[in-house]
C-alpha cells in the first residue's frame, strides 16, 4: 500500500523488451535504497511493481501483459523519468490517501495552463466509464501522486488539477506536456460508495 506522496523521481536506466514482458531498472538515490530488497513493493508512476533484483542503486522490475496494456508501463522508455514511492509502514504519516498501486486506466493531458502566476494547471481527458467516480474536491492518484480534483466536466469527461510548486519539484509533472498519458487510480472508498449506491438503486427498480 502507498500514500500517494511521491518520495522521488528517477530515470529508467536499462530496458529489456521481450514478447509480453518488459524488464527495466531505475537508478535511485542512496538514501532511498535503505532496507530495499528483492520482493519489495515499489510504486513506479503509480503502478505497484515487485523489485526483482537490487544491485547497488539499481532496482529491476518485470512488467507483464496485463500491466503493459492497462498502464503507461507499456510505453516506458530508457532515460524516461518516473515517480517512485516505497510502500508505507505501519506508523508512517499518511499525508495523501491510501492507494493500492492497482491502476484503473490511463488519462490524457489535453491542456497545460501556466497563464496564472505561480499556478500550474493540467486538464485531463478520462475514459467515460471512470467519470462516475470523479467529483470536484474528490481525489485520485495520477502517476502515483495523490491529487485533489477541480473543474470536473461530466459532459466532456474532463477534470483539472492544480499543482503546487512542491509537487512539481518532487514529481515528473513539471515536465508533462499535452498529449501525454498518465496512470489513474480511483479512490477505493469512492468506488465502493458509488457502486453500492448503484446496486441498491438497481435492486429497488427490480423490486
Image (spheres, grey):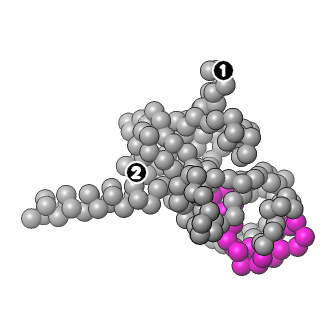
Which image quarter: residue 169?
A: top right
Tell me the mark number nearer the camera, choosing from 1 and 2. Answer: 1
Image coordinates of residue 202 in percent, x first then y, are: 20, 60
**What residue is rendered at 39% in x and 55% in y?**
190
Residue 50: horizontal and vertical position, in percent?
69, 73
Q: Residue at x 60, y 39 (%)?
A: 109
Q: Which residues are magenta?
A: 37-59
Question: Magenta stretch: residue 47 in it?
Answer: yes
| Labels 1 and 2: the sequence-earlier one | 1
Circle 1 packing at 10 Å, graded few (<14), some (14-19), many (20+), is few
Q: Is residue 105 visible?
A: no
34 part of magenta stretch: no
For the question of whether residue 39 can be seen, the reply is yes
Disc 1 secondary structure class: loop
Q: Which residue is mark 2?
A: 133
- The answer to which of 62 and 186 lies nearer the viewer is 186
Q: Position of residue 185 (x, y in %)?
A: 53, 56
Q: Residue at x 33, y 58 (%)?
A: 193
Picture layout, residue 140 above or below residue 91: above
Q: Considering depth in this image, is 185 or 67 the residue closer to the camera?
A: 185
In the picture as drawn, the residue positioned furthest to the front comes out as: 91
Q: Which residue is mark 1?
A: 117
- The secondary structure type at the circle numbered 2 is helix
Q: Residues within 10 Å of mark 2 (few under 14, many from 20)?
A: some
Q: Position of residue 91 (x, y in %)?
A: 60, 66
Predominant SS along the magenta part: strand
**In the image, residue 127 above or below residue 63:** above
Amino acid at each position: 500500500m502507498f500514500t500517494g506522496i511521491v518520495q522521488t523521481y528517477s530515470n529508467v536506466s536499462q530496458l529489456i523488451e521481450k514478447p509480453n514482458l518488459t524488464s527495466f531498472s531505475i537508478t535511485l538515490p542512496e538514501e532511498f535504497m535503505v532496507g530495499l530488497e528483492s520482493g519489495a513493493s515499489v510504486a513506479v508512476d503509480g503502478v505497484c511493481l515487485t523489485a526483482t533484483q537490487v544491485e547497488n542503486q539499481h532496482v529491476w522490475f518485470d512488467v507483464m501483459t496485463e500491466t503493459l496494456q492497462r498502464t503507461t508501463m507499456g510505453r516506458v522508455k530508457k532515460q524516461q523519468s518516473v515517480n517512485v514511492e516505497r510502500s508505507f509502514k505501519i506508523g508512517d504519516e499518511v499525508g495523501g490517501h491510501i492507494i493500492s498501486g492497482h491502476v484503473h486506466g490511463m488519462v490524457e493531458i489535453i491542456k497545460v495552463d501556466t497563464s496564472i502566476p505561480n499556478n500550474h494547471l493540467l486538464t485531463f481527458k478520462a475514459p467515460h466509464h471512470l467519470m462516475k467516480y470523479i467529483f470536484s474536491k474528490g481525489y485520485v492518484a495520477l502517476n502515483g501522486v495523490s491529487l485533489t480534483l477541480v473543474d470536473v466536466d461530466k459532459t466532456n469527461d474532463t477534470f483539472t488539477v492544480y499543482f503546487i510548486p512542491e509537487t512539481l519539484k518532487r514529481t515528473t509533472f513539471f515536465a508533462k506536456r499535452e498529449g501525454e498519458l498518465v496512470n489513474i487510480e480511483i479512490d477505493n472508498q469512492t468506488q465502493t460508495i458509488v457502486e453500492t449506491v448503484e446496486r441498491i438503486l438497481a435492486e429497488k427498480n427490480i423490486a
